[in-house]
Image: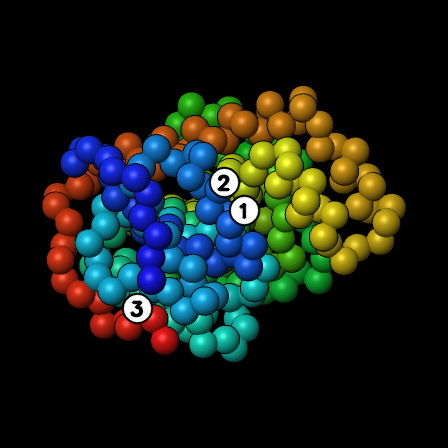
Amino acid sequence: MSIETHAFSMDTPRIALLNAGHAAVETRRNFERELDAELVEFNCPEGEFPSSFAFDGCVVTGSAASVYWDEPWIERLKQWVGEAVAAGLPFLGVCYGHQLLASVLGGEVEDMGEYELGYRTIHHDGENRLLDGIEEEFTAFTTHSDRVTQTPPGANVFARNDYGIQGFRTDRVFAVQFHPEYDLEMARTITKKKDLDEERIDAVLATITDENYRAASETKQLFDNFLAYVESVQTGRTTVESPTPQTD
């Protein structure tokens, strides 16, 4: 099963939204708001996967899951993503998506033993087109307890902070650890759900302000940058069916 948005022109990129979020509705809302594209959503934890590679690009969302969990849907997602990357589809991974792409392509992901949570400062090298137009020192919302400790062979790390790798690219794959799609409501909701001591939660909530959100909104530019890249490499959608079945 897939959920398609309303009709778009033929020039609009067609993007597979591989929704790995357990709060799928909220996750979809965030990406629909930020991506000016025809989104075709697949709820991966519910066993929904594309049956072909007939897309201009793919986005892998965040998730409460870990990429190293032994879950059937995670294995199927890894398989489909690997096949789609090999077929030449451009990818953007966000948080869990960042980690999943690293894992699929030969990198390593590990449990940090703690959370990076809240609005954080990140640095990028100014040389990656995904972050064109974004200050080299920028603010972004983060929420994760796993991290990429080793990128895939040949990948270029273009963003870091004191918690480690925050962005990498390899060929047509772009990945970021932070959440450019979060609004204030989502940042507060996610923070309140964390199993952390009350003092830590309150301290993070105190930083979820209009001022920090405005600063972090600069990172939304990366969605337009990704779509511009997708359009620049677009050569026509493949109609080859995926070997991975669509549903259980």
Please state if 171 lies on the left or on the right of 189 as rendered.
left
Q: Position of residue 151 (x, y in %)?
A: 45, 57
Query: Which label's residue is closer to the chain start, 1 or 3?
Result: 1
Residue 162: percent from left, percent from top: 65, 44
238 to the left or right of 195: left
Q: Amino acid at mark 3?
A: Gln
Between the residue at mark 1 and the residue at mark 2, the CA separation in whole angstroms equals: 6 Å
Tag shown at residue 246:
3
Q: 56 or 22, which is in the foreground?
A: 22
Residue 187 visible in the displayed image: yes
Above or below, 148 relative to 244: above
Q: CA distance from mark 3 to mark 2?
A: 24 Å
| SS for dot 2 | helix
Image quadrant in which the N terminus is located: bottom left
Q: Is residue 76 left or right of residue 114?
A: left
Q: Residue at x 54, y 42 (%)?
A: 179
Report if the CB atoms under discs 1 and 2 are less than 8 Å apart.
yes
* Neighbours of disc 2 within 10 Å: few (<14), some (14-19), many (20+): some
Q: CA distance from mark 1 to mark 3?
A: 23 Å
| Residue drawn at the location 33% of the way across and 57% of the way down | 2
- How many numbered markers are drawn? 3
Name the residue tied to disc 2: 30
The three-letter amino acid code for the residue at tag 1 is Glu
Q: Which residue is mark 1?
A: 26
